[in-house]
Image (cartoon, coloured by chain):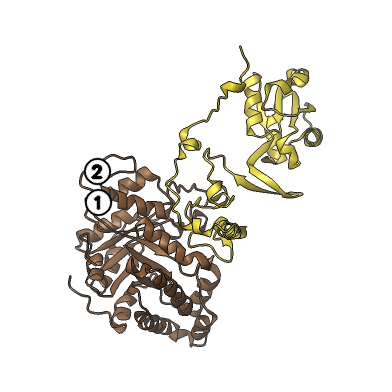
């Protein structure tokens, strides 16, 4: 595989290394201090930093503004973009806005339903869905065209990714759904947080059987648990999340003051095991409001130093 | 059919309390099926409002009437006198009937219902949405189940990552439309269709294109 775009993330993957990404959520205000600090903490331990787009439908500083800030700091942002809040004019316009700043990675998502957040009485847009957004970015990049058919002067040059949830239902079409995303143009995949490793491996087998792991770079998603309470919450309250009982039990059986440490340990163990799964090309570590733990996880998992590309 | 739900009595009272002669006017086709807004319901609503007027000590003459459909001119003929009599009408039709009446009569026409959706009668007292009248039906490729009306994100290539145990991420009481579609495609032996990408939709036939109009010259009256 050779890199087609200037994306550092793509180059790391193309060179055959395990890639590492992490994510930061923009602030619920306009002060950049905290997000800059978070980015500084993780920058040497990852190949790209996802900036979430109003995650859980809670209104925040926009992903694009924070991506621009990271870019001006010399970092490698991954622009997350959901189809919930923008129609095709705004989506294409923001893609060009990102390209204007040479942001070289995009993750195309549909986004959580607005009822989860602070704007439950608002409209959702979904003019396009996440697969159609993938197609749109690829059209803009590869053909240099807008959806309306006109030419783009200096098209965007982005490495194009999507999310995949190996655990959502119906399980039988989860591999087919990945195939669809690949067909729509996904060059990399960041998965939902993996706690049920057996089920993930079953999904990966299905992925390999269809050769999809050779057509897209699959990055395994991981979120360290901070406590047994968080594990229970993720298990019972977060849609599409598969947290096996033994994960909850292991944390619950650990004294409260040691649970965070245990959660980190479990995350590192998961990475070690997933490194052996054929077709896993990297790791997406989503340490939610816990970015300071990312360097330790990356080091302990044997993923540090990050390669120079 | 068009499903509607009667507005709270207090809201309706606020509309009519300043008038002297009010007609509560039923529409006996679509909304009547869900036992809201039909001629019988208009009669009941009129008596509730009369009781309210008595309680409030306000002198209003409230009568009721109704026709089969408030969205077609010809049905109004037999109720012209009643409508003429009133100085305001509380129409218990859907939003279409209310507007159609407002275009016909130079007097206030108030809505008695919230028009809720285009749906089916699952069982007596249970009505569920099926169609959003997007103007370009895609049911042929989705196993006869509409993701526009029935997926909370109107995902055209679903399901999204929030589908769990056949239910939507917004509520355990809402079926995931894409689970239903996948199950149905499987039943029909058409699961291979699932992998075809549904192209970006032309929403210009939907609300996005502005008010819609259909003209059938072949059935128009010669005039």
Q: Chain of mark 1?
A: A
| Residue B95 percent location from the top left of the image | 63, 33
Q: For the residue carrying disc 2, how many other residues have a C-alpha within 10 Å: few (<14), some (14-19), or many (20+)?
A: some
Chain A tint as drawn: brown
In the depicted structure, whether residue B27 falls above or below residue A93 = above
Is A240 left or right of B35, judged from the image as shown? left
Q: Which residue is mark 1?
A: A156
Q: For the residue carrying disc 1, how many other residues have a C-alpha within 10 Å: few (<14), some (14-19), or many (20+)?
A: many
Circle number at residue A43: none
Instruction: Give the quarter of the image for residue A1.
Output: bottom left
The answer to whether residue B21 of the structure is visible from this angle is: yes
| Residue B221 percent location from the top left of the image | 63, 17
- Name the residue: 35% across, 82% down: A276
Q: Which residue is mark 2?
A: A152
Chain B tint as drawn: yellow
Q: Would you say the residues marked 1 and 2 are in contact, meaning their CB atoms lie under 8 Å apart?
A: yes
């Amino acid at each position: 595989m050779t890199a087609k775009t200037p994306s550092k993330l793509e180059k790391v993957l193309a060179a055959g290394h395990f890639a590492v990404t992490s994510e930061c959520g923009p602030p619920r205000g306009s002060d950049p201090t905290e997000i800059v600090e978070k980015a500084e903490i993780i920058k040497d331990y990852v190949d790209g930093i996802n900036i979430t787009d109003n995650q859980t439908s809670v209104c925040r500083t926009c992903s694009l503004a924070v991506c621009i800030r990271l870019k001006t700091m010399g970092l490698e942002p991954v622009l997350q973009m959901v189809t919930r809040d923008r129609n095709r004019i705004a989506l294409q316009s923001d893609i060009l806005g990102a390209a204007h700043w040479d942001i070289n990675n995009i993750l195309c998502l549909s986004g959580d339903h607005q009822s989860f957040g602070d704007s439950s009485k608002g409209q959702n847009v979904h003019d396009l869905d996440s697969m159609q957004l993938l197609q749109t970015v690829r059209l803009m990049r590869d053909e240099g065209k807008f959806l309306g058919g006109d030419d783009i002067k200096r098209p965007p040059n982005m490495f194009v990714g999507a999310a995949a949830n190996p655990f959502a239902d119906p399980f039988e079409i989860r591999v087919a759904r990945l195939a669809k995303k690949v067909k729509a143009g996904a060059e990399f995949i960041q998965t939902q947080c993996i706690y049920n490793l057996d089920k993930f491996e079953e999904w990966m087998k299905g992925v390999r059987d269809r050769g999809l792991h050779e057509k897209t770079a699959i990055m395994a998603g991981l979120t360290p648990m901070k406590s047994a309470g968080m594990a229970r919450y993720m298990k019972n309250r977060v849609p599409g999340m598969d947290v096996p009982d033994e994960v909850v039990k292991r944390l619950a059986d650990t004294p409260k003051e040691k649970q965070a440490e245990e959660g980190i340990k479990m995350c590192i163990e998961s990475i070690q095991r997933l490194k052996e799964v054929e077709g896993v090309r990297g790791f997406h570590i989503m340490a939610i409001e816990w970015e300071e733990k990312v360097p330790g996880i990356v080091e302990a998992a044997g993923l540090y130093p990050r390669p120079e590309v | 059919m068009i499903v509607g739900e009667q507005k709270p009595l207090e809201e309706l009272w606020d509309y009519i309390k300043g008038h002297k002669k009010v007609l509560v006017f039923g529409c006996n086709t679509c909304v009547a099926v869900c036992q809201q807004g039909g001629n019988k319901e208009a009669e009941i609503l009129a008596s509730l409002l009369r009781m309210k007027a008595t309680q409030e000590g306000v002198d209003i003459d409230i009568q009721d009437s109704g026709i089969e459909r408030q969205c077609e001119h010809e049905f109004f003929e037999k109720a012209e006198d009643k409508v003429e009599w009133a100085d305001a009408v509380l129409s218990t039709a859907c939003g279409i009937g209310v507007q159609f009446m407002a275009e016909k009569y130079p007097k206030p026409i108030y809505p008695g219902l919230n028009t809720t959706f285009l749906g089916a009668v699952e069982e007596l007292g249970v009505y569920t949405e099926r169609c959003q009248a997007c103007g370009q039906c895609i049911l042929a490729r989705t196993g006869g189940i509409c993701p526009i009306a029935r997926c909370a994100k109107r995902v055209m290539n679903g399901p999204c990552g929030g589908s769990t145990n056949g239910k939507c991420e917004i509520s355990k009481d809402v079926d995931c439309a894409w689970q239903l579609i996948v199950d149905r495609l499987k039943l029909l032996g058409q699961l291979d269709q699932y992998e075809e990408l549904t192209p970006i939709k032309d929403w210009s036939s939907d609300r996005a294109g502005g008010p819609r109009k259909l003209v059938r010259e072949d059935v128009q009256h010669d005039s």
